[in-house]
Image (tube, rainbow, N blue to C red):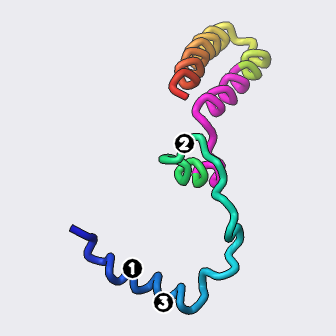
Amino acid sequence: MDHPLIDLITAKIRAAEAEGQFDNLPGAGKPLPKVDDPENAVMHRILKENGAVPEFVSLSRELARLREELRETGDRTRRAEIVREMSMTEVKIELARKRG
């Protein structure tokens, strides 16, 4: 069964075509860009355009922050906590890289 709005959508597209709204669009007549993952290409483009980064990148940034905090911290208890956090973050980075 078709979506209830399919006839309306089709009519709007045909009207836009008749009015020339699709003429002279950027990239018209050129092949679509190659993508590694066509099923998720739109999602990846939207994420990229909105500043999203892969999980391992954000985790790597967190690890760098922890390393800086470790250099600046003299409290032995806090240093031990930071080292534990760093170890866990390194494991998370490795798992994120394996997931892709």
Mark 1: secondary structure: helix
Who comes first in sequence, dot 1 or dot 2? 1
Question: Which residue was labeled with disc 1?
Answer: 9
CA separation, marks 3 and 1?
Answer: 10 Å
- The three-letter amino acid code for the residue at tag 2 is Asp
Give neighbour class at mark 3: few <14, some 14-19, many 20+ (Cα, 10 Å): few
**Residue 37, numbered label:** 2
Circle 1: residue type: Ile
Front in this rendered view, residue 98 or 39 = 39
Residue identifier under label 3: 15
Earlier in the chain: of badge 3 and badge 1, it is 1
**Which residue is located at x 46 percent, y 85 percent?**
14
Q: Position of residue 15 (x, y in %)?
A: 48, 89
Q: In this picture, which residue range is highlighted in magenta?
A: 47-66
Determine the secondary structure under disc 3. Answer: helix
The foreground one among 56 and 77 is: 56
Q: Say how many tags the image has.
A: 3
Residue 38 among magenta residues:
no
